[in-house]
Amino acid sequence: MTDSEKFIQDNIGYREKPFVVLTDPKATKCLYDKTTKPVLDLLKEKPMTRYDLEIELNKSQKTIYRYLKKLEEAGLIVKGGKRIINEKGEYKVYTLFSRTAKIYYDNYSTKFVDEELKIETKAEHRNKIMSLVAKLLGQLYENQKGDIGMLWTLYKDIEIKKLEYIERLMSSADDEMLDFISTLTTLEVAFIIEMIGIFAILREKQWEKQVLDSFY
């Protein structure tokens, strides 16, 4: 078949965001799931149709459809455009799927734990967890007793501030940085972003005093 007999045109209507923080458990699960992660990895390069993905992953139409549905419901991909194929005067139109962002960061863990620990029936378990945290940290403060409520509140405050730094710094990253980060594994991306947040938060000295005030 010659080029004159077949014409392909991709019309992309969606531009992926540089960086998105995930707060939904469904999104986090898809990010690490061994079935849906390969789809996300392939879409790093360019938008693809369901048929492209079937070929690349050697999976059935039904299986790829299921993966795409899960990823779309989780907000990790969107219908980003159309592929128009003119083959010997016969037109066919296929949906192109795109990632919603070049880089994803999983920040669901703290929210999940927070919600879990609020459940009244798990109050005893919650207190055991926070008591363990207080005892371990207490070794740094002459084995003083820690206020578990203050420590948990302080931890959430630090996480919020850390996330503010992460979003600010990542939003100012240039295309070269983002392109390189997008080639890394999910765990490597999380490692880099966590390091950015930790070192940024260390610039603020008030946290040490607040931790000290949580022990008596």
Image (tube, rainbow, N blue to C red):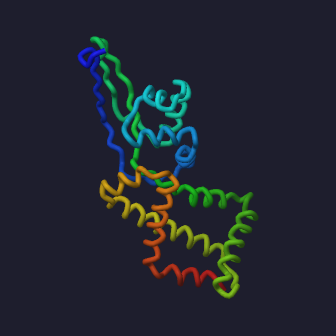
Question: In this orientation, which residue lies closer to the viewer: 212 or 98?
Answer: 98
In the rendered image, the vertical position of residue 167 relative to residue 216, given as above or below: above
Residue at point 55%, 55% (across, down) = 108
**Residue 96's quadrant in the figure?**
top left
**Residue 167's quadrant in the figure?**
bottom left
Residue 137, how many percent across, how many down?
A: 65, 78
In the rendered image, the vertical position of residue 55 relative to residue 92, given as above or below: below
Q: Residue furthest bottom?
A: 142
In the rendered image, the vertical position of residue 73 relative to residue 197, given as above or below: above
Question: In this orientation, which residue lies closer to the viewer: 142 or 87?
Answer: 87
163 relative position to 180: left or right? right
Q: Which residue lies furthest to the left in this view?
A: 4
Residue 10, how many percent across, how many down?
A: 30, 29
Residue 205, how many percent across, how many down?
A: 46, 82
**Residue 63's quadrant in the figure?**
top right
92 relative position to 65: left or right? left
Residue at point 29%, 17% (across, down) = 6
Q: In which quarter of the image is the C terminus?
A: bottom right
- How many numbered callouts? 0
Q: Quadrant of the N terminus?
A: top left
Residue 163, how many percent across, how many down?
A: 46, 63
Residue at point 76%, 64% (across, down) = 124
